[in-house]
Image: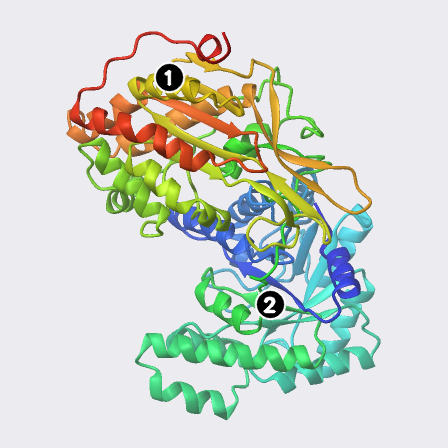
Amino acid sequence: MSKISDKIAHHVREFPEKPFFSFEYFPPKSEIGTMNLFERFDRMAQLNPLWVDVTWGAGGSTADHTFDICVDALKCRGLDVMMHLTCTNITEESIRSVLDKCKDAGICNILALRGDPPDGQSRWSQTEGGFNHAIDLVKYMRQNYGDFFCIAVAGYPEGHLEADDMERDLKYLKEKVDAGANFIITQLFFDNQVFLDFDKRCKDIGINVPVLPGIMPIQSYAGFRKMTDFCKCKVPRCIDDGLDPVKDDERKVKDFGVEVGIKMCNQLIQAGVPGLHFYTLNLETTVLRILNGLQLVDDWQSMRELPWRPAKLKESKESVRPIFWANRPSSYIKRTETWDDFPNGRFGNKDSPAYGECVFVSYSKESQTKIKKDRLDMWGYPETVQDITSTIIKFLKGDIKRLPWCQDAPSKETNFVLKQILKLNAIGALTTNSQPRVNGALSSDPYVGWGPPNGFVYQKAYVEFFLSKERLQHLLNAIEAERLNNWSINAINREGHWESNTGPKCVNAVTWGVFPGSEIIQPTVVDTQSFIAWKTEAFDLWDEWKNLYEDGHKSKELLEDIQSTWYLVSIVDNDYLSGDMFTILVKLLEDSWERYSEGSIEKAASFSIRTRLYG
């Protein structure tokens, strides 16, 4: 966990020429919406926002939902998070309970607000036993929790809706800062001069904390009009003149919104704002286009601290993660969140009661119906192995957005071996994860780089896939004949019949980095115990696909057969200097695919990789 005030100070000190950005979301009203929001978190996290925050519904109507989303963003998405907290419909006792929950969960950033009236009420009123103003909440937090929380408060460049005196409104803001607020986020505006005047007035009366502009991109004509009317925002004539002629064309409205957003933000950056806070309305495309237009998203260099996004867990020391969860990071975090801390230097403690436990979320019948339709649209009705390989190939090419084993699109580094990965799937090796070999790439490399600047990164070629038992035997025979002794192999079926040429306690570092003034860092490993734990989840994930179909359906029978008889195979090529594992593997599997497709491949007898390769 990190205090946002500390992150702002660090960013301003280390990157004075580059403003940061942050995103605001609201709790969706449905399970499907929440699931989609989590997927959006994963995608937008790749942009490296300084933090995200989640609103507290009017009258505290989404209190539990807001808290749950914040915990998920913090623990499972690797995002620093700020939770909104209002005084509406909540007593001092309830606020104490909420803040204690936040502290226990590691949420240390709060946006303290008075809040809007509950639904159905036109005026705000103090709850008996509660607080009347945001300053009361700020004071309470400082008196009872000291400096544990970083506290943000709201600023109103055009005055609060209920304010009858702008100077008095500004005085109230200074009182919130004097009471312990660390920074200010403003209400939305569309006239930059309004914000710049407000920022100057803040400084003139002694407000010395950061004042961050709140930017709400124009997403739709009706939404823009509704919001500006509600907030009584001043809208420059140039925006009205540009928007009215295209108001009936949704695409042109969004294009105009992007144009306005880029222009506004550029002017604010030139005026010296340290960062931009985007009210996303739970949408991503327009915000992403604006950030790209501002050149704030660095596609030309790596921004990754590690090859994976670390969890923001309390006192976490995580520096190593098994590669098997590269495409399902939240699943890995949920497995290990009850551990005392994450492994540091070696992935271990297979005796932990949490080790190997899978966590699956159940949804209501309505949500399950929507999920089923979405999955069927992506995955169709396979009747042959070739149909399944076609679906995976569509995913690799970006034609569908996910698979049971992959929560997001393939990583950029997949491009280096994409041709071979496509071929492997075309010949019946159903891939779930891979990485190319890397020998001394710059840590700033936009595809494979990670870690601090001026370093070098390395990695071994790795691939994981499902393969039929018969073809696995053929593959092992071929590996033995070719004397591919640099390959480390694990294979296991659903029942747990495990074969390996590495032994039960092997831990193989497959990614490492060398950085100035630092020991060698080995963040990604392949270890046998984790592979055995991962296999349970990997095979169970076939249920997500097969349960789309009724009993007796050809698709379900096909998927059940794969789930019950195929093997999960993991191969590491330890020759990171000149190995060509993917090309060789394609050649080794091509012959057996032709015979398998014709139905002529012999049924496998029992086998042992240990004796076959090294006996």
Q: Do the residues labelled 2 and 1 touch (CB within 8 Å)?
A: no
Give 392 or 113, whichever is nearer the viewer. Answer: 392
Task: Identify residue type, mark 1.
Answer: Asn
Quarter of the image where one finds residue 173: bottom right
Rendered location of residue 352, percent (x, y): 62, 18
Q: Which mark is residue 477?
A: 1
Give 62 or 246, whichever is nearer the viewer. Answer: 246
Give 595 or 342, whichever is nearer the viewer. Answer: 595
Q: Name the residue under label 2.
A: 296
Total count of labels: 2
Report the coloring of the rendering: rainbow
Q: What element carries label 2?
A: loop
Residue at the image point whose x is 51% and y is 46% from the top: 65
Q: Is mark 1 on a helix, strand or loop?
A: helix
The residue most toward the front is 482
Residue at the image point whose x is 27% and y is 30% from the top: 546
Rendered location of residue 77, percent (x, y): 56, 45
Near mark 2 (Cα within 10 A), the count class, few <14, some 14-19 or many ≥20, is: some
Rendered location of residue 250, percent (x, y): 33, 75
Is 580 on the left-hand or right-hand side of 100?
left
Is 130 on the left-hand or right-hand side of 484?
right
Relative to 153, residue 338 above or below: above
Q: How far apart are marks 2 and 1 (CA)?
A: 52 Å
Quarter of the image containing the N terminus?
Answer: top right
Residue at the image point whose x is 60% and y is 67% from the top: 296
Rendered location of residue 212, percent (x, y): 68, 70
Mark closest to the chain's N terminus, 2 or 1: 2
Relative to 164, residue 184 above or below: above
Task: Identify residue type, mark 2.
Answer: Leu
